[in-house]
Image (cartoon, rainbow, N blue to C red):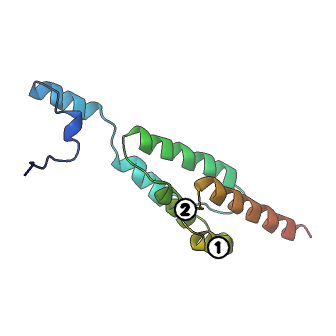
Amino acid sequence: MRPRFPVGYDIIRNKNTAYLMWDTIEERPSQLLPRKIIMTMKLHGENNLETFSLEFEENIRKVNACGVEWTNQESICCLLLAMPKSLETVTTILESMPSKELTVDIAKTRLRSEVERNRSKKYK
């Protein structure tokens, strides 16, 4: 039976001294903060969906840069949870789509089109 090593062991296993191990661990960016930021993001109002999308993508890049395996499903889940009540209809539709067909880009496109549709209703 192979011994189990703690998570993150792979980044320090080739270090020869405790100092090098500690230095490597300190240099590695924290994984928790970028995840927390993504999971707590909320879109307030529909007007700033584009800005929100850019911030969301930037935070996904930060998580990936930390070495976290962040799946497409996790991204979609966090994106849909961040949407306001006014986009609940399209959010429900996206949630019911087969997971193999749904991507972040498809979700953002559908959300954008719903925002545009809501804007056009206001001006009629």
Of 122 and 2, the residue lying toward us:
2
Look at mark 1 in the image and give the residue it sits on.
93
Q: Which residue is rendered at x = 13% and y = 26% of the image?
A: 19
Left or right, 119 with respect to 56, comes to right
Q: Residue at x 59, y 61 (%)?
A: 102
Q: Which mark is residue 25?
A: none
Q: Nearer the viewer, residue 7 or 37?
A: 7
Query: Which residue is at the far right?
Result: 124
The answer to whether 26 is drawn above or below residue 59 in the figure is above
Residue 50 at x, y = what percent? 68, 50
Mark 2: few, some, or many residues within 10 Å (few <14, many ≥20)?
Answer: few
Residue 5 at what x, y percent from top left? Answer: 14, 46
Q: State which tag comes first along the sequence, 2 or 1.
A: 1
At x 34%, y 50%, the residue is 32
The location of residue 41, given as percent across then percent down, is 51, 57
Dot 2: what SS? Answer: loop
Number of marks in the rendered image: 2
In the image, taking residue 66 as reference, residue 14 lies left or right, namely: left
- Relative image position of residue 60 (x, y in whole percent): 49, 46
Name the side, left or right, on which 108 lies relative to 114: left
Identify residue type, mark 1: Ile
Q: Quadrant of the C terminus?
A: bottom right
Decide if residue 18 is on the left or right side of residue 92.
left
Q: Nearer the viewer, residue 102 or 26?
A: 102
Q: Looking at this view, name the residue that lies furthest to the front.
A: 1
Tell me the tag on residue 100.
2
Neighbor class of circle 1 (other Cα within 10 Å; few <14, some 14-19, many 20+) is: few
From mark 2 to mark 1, how far is it between C-alphas? 15 Å
Q: In terms of secondary structure, where does tag 1 sit?
A: helix
Q: Tell me: residue 24, above or below residue 124.
A: above
Tag 2 near tag 1, CB within 8 Å: no
What amino acid is found at the position of numbered circle 2 in the picture? Lys
